[in-house]
Image (cartoon, coloured by chain):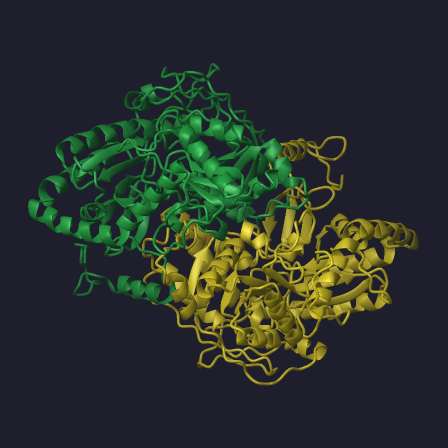
Chain colours: A green, B yellow
């Protein structure tokens, strides 16, 4: 047992009777392939801001729950959804003023001007001042740079007119410029993402993207995706998610799906977007097909918290667009200001997707997701005359939650806050990297960060067992992290955006202590043996599969085994 | 304009500026193939019980929004979800006592004893009395028959133990016995649906069913579905939804999908479940495949509010189960007591599905859905080791909403209420059928009812234009209905379950007046011409497609064109 506050209700092993009963009932009656985090699962019963509390009242610093974007139990979002639940919560077949208001507000954020060459701070074009940063962000110098901002928060009173949001230039965050090679300085014209669909989940949004691609590119039935990507749990999405089809229990790649080798800036591999685009186009042709679409997260999450090299997505998009391929930016994890330097991840790459999918943070946990696309693609999807109806998508309470989330992000300057705290974290993590052999790489944008754990700096060999051990040791210190990436060796940091400098210091301090004090020579030796075992049984074969894919793509040869 | 209460904010055509702006913005920015109900869409801004209110305060009787199961704006459900949104709303990777509590409660309802032969009223086996019916239901004689009931309402205090629900026998509702031929009187043993998955939407639940079938029946890649069925909007589900693939904009049947001809008790067609099962098994074999699963709503909704003949599903299940086919009961529309005679639709047919999917009413509009299955199938799905994770599925606020819905249904006796009001409606609608040539059939179970509109009783020809006209005329009288069925000629009645005798009288009175006073000889002549047009352009070709499917299945010949 991993909890220290044993009171009257706890048993001899420290678990309360409520905990034991809940765990037994869950194991008995809930899907056996759903998972509980940590070796000893946590029973969390309350959340506030970026903290979670277990049934014994123990406080945990939450560094991973990116869905609770503006904070656990955020009163403003909860109140907004609650009021709507009491008043009316019905579907989009009735007109309601908040749905088109939300739709136009969200679309305006996507079409905000974007330049990936400027690092000068910008300000709203109108004379009034934006709402200041509140709640501990406090650094005025970040208050306007790269933000999708407005002089007036989105209106919620249904009698008011729809807010006009003034698009703002999106400068590239400074850190990216320091760490990456500069690309061309041309300003990319923004896509006209003028039509929105509201759905329930990121999976529904990405599945809808597949339907739109199929309608708009008939005959071009092949798809390209990024290595390590996860796009959702529907039947069709598992097929386009290498994280799943090459992961535990996966049944392999379907012939119509082509996997772009995931860039690995840390190891200097697969950094050429243009070459990758040409390789998947050729692979589709060799397989007798044609690519209809390319799905890609703008910052890779399940792929291992990978920041794409500057210019990478531009090159890839250029090449694929020329071949008529539709470009889908999956922003389910990286959108809504998390990246700090821009409101949307794709804006940090200076690209213009044809379709953008959104989820997780959009409703701060209230089930909501969205897909934005061009008028042309929406028309192609609608042309045959089949209605699209989503029972809960666009329902009134979901829209109320979505409006409140946008309002809080904007008013509290959470995008800038994410940028500032992210920079602070990266700086601190950089010091840990310098001091510790297992900390191979630290990277990220805003509050979307990864720490790649390796066996040693020279070999850069993946160390999933050590990453897992670190996660568990940090949990014992009341700091919640998780691991990700195809080799499960990247500690991910994706907290609620209200995570501040104080919390960054707690995280850095505890991680430093674990690395300094707990990761002894003895422990490293034990972990080394465990690394050998899991590499031999799980990750090594998967690594070979990804390598084989690269070989097949770049050499043009058929796969030896996939 | 169809609204009479024009105040200061309305324009010259009766539309308020808010209405006009919202309609324009919606048409500009929201998916063009999403629909708004009625020729002049309603802007609904408030709901209460089974009434909706537009922006001018005009009250409408809602006879169709089956998602708001326990009433629009139900304070108890809203308060339950709201409290949880303020406290904690996180995912199922943490343990929370309410998730397994809800899971076990929902599973207990599915495994309640079921007999389709008894029509005697039953009572709880324990000594205490069930909670009485409240809120206007008032007829004690229905308080216990066929209900999934409990002496204690589901507990909501997280410190209490999980409620033990006592399964109850499920007598067949009397009406069915009067209208249908009796089947064998043997009591069907219930399935062991012991494992639950919580997801976001009915679509996600049915898509998950496809994944489980694929895992548990490898190689048996063919699927059977019911004619006219709609199972959801994901890529994979459109392919198994004849309502879509043979409907407007559909691209036809995939070779691995086989369509069971929909029973039409009104016309005496396709009533033999055993013959249909054999036909689809043979069709799959002819196509070089093997059926892995059969998806079927227990009462057909998009198929045209069709009550399956007694014994039909038993025969079909028997035959398919013998061939190893997995049987999925889609309860997204008909579950949670709506059918009156039983808590679940499949219980009215006395069958034991391998998988049950649920959605719409489950959270009274809070996005939630579920899939229940056997331990064996869950194990087969889990065996390869692939995790199933659903971000919002099983999140704490969704579970709170789900628990509250079950509590309200049980405490307020809404299943019995649905039975009582449904019988009253059927009786009144029967009088309208006797009096009016266009009312071809009235049918249903509980508050899941259909009125089939025909050109005349002798021909029984479908009359979609007349059905649509009736819907619009009823809307002008502030009564909301909609149309369904492959030929769009069935007026559906699926109101919130709080719909009472008073509301039934309003509905019957207004419909009677429209039929008596508005459907004049002149109007019928105009509609007749319109019927000819829409049949020639839309419904006739679709009818031929369904007929061709029947011919192909029963004759074993390949299709002339599908």
Tell me where residue B22 sits by quadrant.
Answer: top right
Residue plotted at (53% across, 44% down): A199
Q: Is residue A480 above or below residue A153?
A: below
Tell me where residue A14 sits by quadrant.
Answer: bottom left
Q: Is residue A210 above or below residue B286?
A: above
Image quadrant occupied by the C terminus of chain B: bottom right
Image quadrant occupied by the N terminus of chain B: top right
Residue A361 horizontal/vertical position (percent):
41, 40
Image check: A13 left or right of B417? left
Give whichever of B163, B543 is nearer the camera.
B543
Residue A390 horizontal/vertical position (percent):
57, 48
Give whichever of B17, B23 is nearer the camera.
B23
Residue plotted at (43% across, 37% down): A296
Can residue B4 be seen by looking at this rendering?
A: yes
Can residue B404 be seen by looking at this rendering?
A: no
Residue B134 horizontal/vertical position (percent):
55, 66
Residue plotted at (66% across, 32% down): B24
Image check: A37 left or right of A10? right
Give whichever of A226, B59 is nearer the camera.
A226
Q: Is residue A241 above or below residue A293?
A: below
Tell me where residue A332 sits by quadrant.
Answer: top left
- How many discs mark residues in the rendered view? 0
Residue B161 horizontal/vertical position (percent):
34, 67
């Amino acid at each position: 047992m991993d909890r220290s506050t044993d009171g009257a209700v706890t048993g001899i092993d420290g678990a309360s009777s409520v905990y034991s009963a809940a765990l037994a009932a869950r194991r008995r009656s809930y899907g056996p392939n759903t998972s509980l985090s940590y070796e000893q699962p946590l029973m969390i019963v309350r959340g506030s801001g970026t903290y979670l509390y277990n049934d014994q009242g123990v406080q945990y610093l939450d560094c991973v729950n990116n869905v609770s974007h503006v904070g656990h139990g955020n009163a403003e979002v909860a109140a907004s959804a609650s009021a709507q639940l009491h008043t009316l919560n019905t579907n989009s077949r009735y007109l309601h003023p908040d749905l088109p208001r939300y739709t136009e507000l969200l679309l305006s954020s996507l079409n905000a001007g974007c330049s990936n060459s400027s690092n000068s701070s910008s300000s709203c074009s109108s004379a009034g001042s934006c709402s200041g940063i509140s709640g501990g962000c406090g650094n005025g110098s970040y208050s306007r740079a790269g933000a999708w901002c407005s002089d007036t928060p989105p209106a919620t009173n249904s009698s008011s007119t729809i807010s006009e949001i003034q698009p703002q230039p999106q400068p590239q965050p400074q850190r990216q410029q320091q760490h990456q090679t500069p690309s061309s300085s041309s300003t990319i014209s923004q896509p006209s993402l003028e039509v929105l669909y509201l759905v329930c989940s990121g999976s529904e949004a990405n599945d809808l993207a597949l339907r739109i691609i199929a309608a708009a590119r008939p005959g071009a039935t092949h798809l390209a995706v990024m290595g390590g990507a996860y796009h959702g749990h529907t039947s069709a999405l598992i097929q386009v998610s290498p994280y799943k089809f090459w992961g535990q229990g996966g049944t392999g790649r379907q012939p119509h799906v082509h996997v772009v080798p995931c860039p690995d800036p840390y190891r200097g591999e697969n950094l050429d977007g243009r070459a990758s685009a040409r390789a998947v186009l050729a692979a589709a042709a060799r397989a007798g097909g044609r690519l209809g679409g390319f799905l890609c997260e703008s910052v890779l999450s399940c792929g291992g918290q990978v920041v794409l090299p500057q210019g990478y997505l531009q090159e890839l998009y250029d090449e694929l667009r020329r071949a008529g391929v539709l470009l889908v930016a999956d922003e389910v994890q990286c959108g809504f200001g998390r990246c700090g330097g821009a409101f949307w991840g794709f804006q940090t790459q200076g690209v213009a997707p044809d379709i953008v999918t959104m989820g997780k943070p959009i409703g701060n946990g209230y089930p909501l997701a969205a897909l934005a696309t061009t008028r042309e693609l929406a028309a192609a999807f609608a042309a045959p005359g089949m209605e699209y109806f989503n029972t809960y998508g666009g329902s009134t309470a979901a829209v109320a939650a979505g409006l409140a989330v946008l309002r809080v992000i904007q008013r509290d300057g959470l995008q800038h806050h994410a940028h500032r705290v992210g920079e602070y974290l990266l700086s601190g993590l950089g010091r840990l990297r310098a001091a510790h052999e297992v900390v191979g790489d630290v990277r990220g944008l805003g509050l979307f960060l990864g720490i790649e754990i390796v066996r040693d700096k020279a070999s850069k060999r993946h160390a999933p067992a050590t990453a897992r051990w670190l996660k568990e040791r940090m949990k014992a210190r009341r700091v919640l992290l998780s691991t990700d990436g195809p080799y499960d060796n990247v500690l991910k940091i994706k907290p609620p955006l209200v995570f501040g400098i104080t919390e960054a210091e707690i995280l850095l301090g505890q991680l430093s202590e674990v690395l300094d004090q707990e990761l002894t020579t003895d422990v490293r030796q034990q972990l080394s043996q465990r690394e050998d075992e899991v590499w031999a049984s799980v990750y090594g074969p998967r690594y070979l599969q990804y390598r084989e894919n690269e070989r097949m793509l770049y050499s043009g040869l058929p796969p030896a085994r996939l």
